[in-house]
Image (spheres, helix red, strand yellow):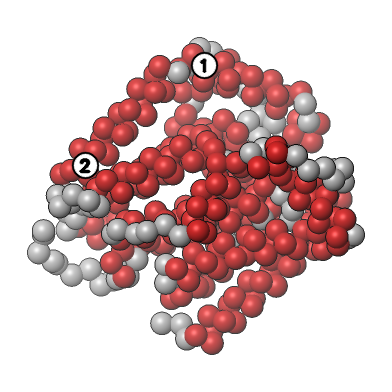
Amino acid sequence: MISKLHVKKIWVIFFFIKVFYMLFAITVYSKLTTLGDTFDYLNAPLSLSIKIFYSSTSMMQFLGSLLKTIFKLDVLACFPFMLLSFYGIYYAVVQLNLYRYAVYILILFSLPNFGVWTSILGKEAVGCFSLSVIAVIIIKRLRGKYRLKPIHYLALYLCFVFKPQYLIFVLQTIVFLWITNRFADKRYFPLILGSIIILMNLLALYILRDFIDSIARGMAIHFRSNDPNLAQSTRSEAPWLEPYGIFKSAPYGMFIAFFGPTISEMLSKPTQLLAGLESLAMLGCFALLAIPKLRYNLAFFRFNPKVFISCFIIFVGILFIHYPFGFLNPGSAIRYRSNFYPLFVFITLYFFTHDGKRVSLLKVRPLTVR
């Protein structure tokens, strides 16, 4: 168990890491590549309209212009957004009592690309905050009945404004857990209800297959022509040109859209190599956290349908939604991954620490199968 003093030191270290990434992004990284829409938001005209409450771009333009007017300097204008993402992670760790895994958390949330994109004025900082808080909702409901608080409604609202495509699967999971927590049958009912939800999603994909296929082809054209910075590393859209290619390429596409660069891209560009090494470190930490629990469950035939269905909806649903945005360009894959990355980290930590017990690969003892 890490002492409270060590935990405080880790938070101080993490805070200054976030400050460093904020300074690095504005003063150095922005000279090497396009820093998203940050400077467009900062230099937008200050105007107040009803659109700022339901349009993510309008909200960011208003806040960026307002903060630039108040603080004058770009770095200082980014500081509130850096604090927002920092607080989202801090809130989740405190609420979920994950102090003992503070070192893992420090490593996972201090990786360079995630650090840069969530430490500046941008949609990724808001996504980091909202999905971190939403992780608390989901995990608390996995543990039992849980009443939502104002900060949870704020996070859901921000997710609706900034990432409504993620909210589809977030709400499915929350509703699934809300229903299953009200039934005494914890074994068969969650499995039946979860199977119905998954089948409904598959049916929706089938019904909308032509629409999704046409949207995918349109996205390929966008990545090919609009942004010269994207065009330098944009991949071939060939897999999507054949009928329903987006579905045929989905298994590999979902993985590479999450991971970022391919091996050939890592070997051809230093920046892609660094991004790939970061993704390898991230997956390595995930494996260290999840494999012992998976091995334990397989060894003793333990299966929790509520946990499995919830994780399946969140992970597969969001990865499929992310796949069209990240498949065609590794830079976009890593940037947009920053939005839902905290949710994946905290759910993985929950799976590893379910019931508050850490499972060790070296200390697996037989238990009575229940």
Percent position (x, y) of residue 49? Answer: 75, 39
Rendered-image quadrant of the C terminus: bottom left
| Residue 196 or residue 103, whichever sits in front | 196
Query: Looking at the picture, which amino acid does disc 1 mark?
Result: Phe
Residue tagged 1: 211
Query: Looking at the picture, which amino acid does disc 2 mark?
Result: Leu
| Residue 355 or residue 248, whichever sits in front | 355
> Is disc 2 placed on a helix, strand or loop?
helix
Horizontal side of 355 relative to 283 (left or right) equals left
CA distance separating discs 1 and 2: 30 Å
Res 270 seen here: no
Res 102 seen here: yes
Above or below: residue 156 compared with residue 140: above
Q: Residue at x 79, y 50 (%)?
A: 64
The numbered mark, 1 or 2, whose residue comes first in the sequence reads 2
Above or below: residue 158 compared with residue 192: below
Horizontal side of 320 relative to 118 (left or right) equals left
